Image: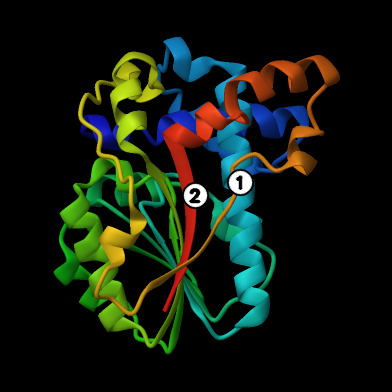
């Protein structure tokens, strides 16, 4: 498994730890997988503040996916860059089909913990190769989760991925997190992914330049740290967490965009 793929253990650890505490995210699958994988993460990756942040990010994506499915029960859900995430079990609104996608070695590990059925499938897919989007199931509407992915792709690769999705599906809803260029520069010194060997990341300052000329349009920006989730921390934890993740500086580093066509 390469360095980029190893980053999947950072959010897995965070979701596992928070789930054990009974706050923000109920994720017994993460607890079990983390225990069995026992990947040796260290340094900033083991920070409880990062664990809270990873769990909140996951919960925001979960809630958004759930709300999209409630509007369109016949939609196809695509989680591209799924890692070892168990969103397919956390989201409770039924869907007609859910496909988790990642690189082959990640999918191989996933198949140790998840089982395919009539509505749930796993497929190997390289997000940097947009021609592979054509292999995905056909459907009028697709709900696309791009969590923790864009920062490992160049801007042209992100555009290529979005363009392929735009051509493939008549109606599409996307939630995608991105680093800014400032965030990429800052990450050279403080990003937990450095602890697993990742040294190259990519940022997006203007989402409009990425989707220019596509049917896909910007809808709105979401918060990674909604007040309702921050309130699940203790009063002292809230104070420190807000200093780290909810001020204007954090938004200069990291953004969460909803798109649609």
Up-down: is 246 above or below 26?
above
Up-down: is 117 above or below 255?
below
Q: How is the rendered protein coloured?
A: rainbow
- 221 or 54, nearer to the observer: 221
Disc nearer the start of the sequence (2/1): 1
Quarter of the picture containing the N terminus is top left
Locate residue 246 relative to residue 164 in the image: left or right. right
Up-down: is 126 above or below 253?
below
User: Which residue is at 43% across, 32% downward?
Assistant: 253
Up-down: is 24 above or below 13?
below
**Which x, y percent locates residue 131?**
15, 71
Circles 2 and 1: CB atoms closer than 8 Å: yes
Q: Report if residue 42 is visible in the image.
A: yes
Locate residue 212 relative to residue 85 in the image: left or right. left
User: Which residue is at 69% across, 16% downward?
Assistant: 240
Secondary element at tag 1: loop
Q: Which mark is residue 223?
A: 1
Q: Which mark is residue 98?
A: none
**Which x, y percent locates residue 218?**
44, 66
Secondary element at tag 2: strand
Q: Quadrant of residue 16?
A: top right
Which residue has dot 2 on it? Answer: 256
Q: Residues within 10 Å of mark 2 (few under 14, many from 20)?
A: many
Distance between the Cα atoms at labels 2 and 1? Answer: 7 Å
**Which x, y percent locates residue 74?**
56, 86
User: Which residue is at 32% across, 48% downward?
Assistant: 150
**Which x, y percent locates residue 17?**
63, 26
Locate residue 193 relative to residue 87 in the image: left or right. left
Q: Residues within 10 Å of mark 1 (few under 14, many from 20)?
A: some
Quarter of the picture containing the C terminus is bottom left
Q: Report if residue 118 is visible in the image.
A: no
């Amino acid at each position: 498994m390469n360095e980029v793929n190893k980053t999947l253990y950072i959010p897995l650890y965070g979701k596992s730890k928070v789930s054990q505490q009974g706050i923000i995210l109920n994720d017994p699958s993460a607890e079990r997988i983390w225990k069995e994988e026992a990947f040796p993460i260290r340094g900033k990756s083991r920070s409880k503040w990062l664990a809270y942040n990873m769990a909140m990010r996951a919960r925001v994506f979960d809630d958004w996916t759930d709300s999209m499915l409630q509007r369109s029960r016949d939609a196809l859900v695509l989680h591209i860059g799924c890692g070892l995430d168990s969103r397919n079990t956390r989201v409770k609104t039924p869907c007609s089909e859910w496909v988790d996608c990642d690189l082959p070695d990640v999918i191989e590990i996933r198949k140790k913990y998840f089982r395919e059925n009539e509505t749930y499938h796993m497929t190997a897919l390289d997000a940097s190769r947009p021609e592979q989007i054509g292999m995905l199931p056909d459907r009028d509407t697709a709900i696309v989760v791009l969590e923790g992915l864009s920062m490992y792709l160049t801007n042209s690769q992100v555009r290529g991925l979005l363009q392929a999705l735009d051509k493939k599906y008549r109606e599409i809803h996307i939630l995608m997190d991105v680093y800014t260029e400032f965030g990429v520069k800052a990450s050279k010194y403080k990003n937990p992914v450095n602890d697993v060997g990742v040294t190259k990341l990519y940022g997006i300052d203007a989402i409009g330049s990425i989707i220019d000329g596509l049917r896909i349009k910007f809808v709105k920006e979401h918060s990674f740290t909604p007040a309702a989730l921050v309130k699940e921390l203790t009063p002292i934890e809230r104070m420190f967490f807000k200093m780290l993740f909810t001020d204007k500086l954090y938004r200069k580093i990291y953004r969460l965009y909803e798109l649609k066509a």
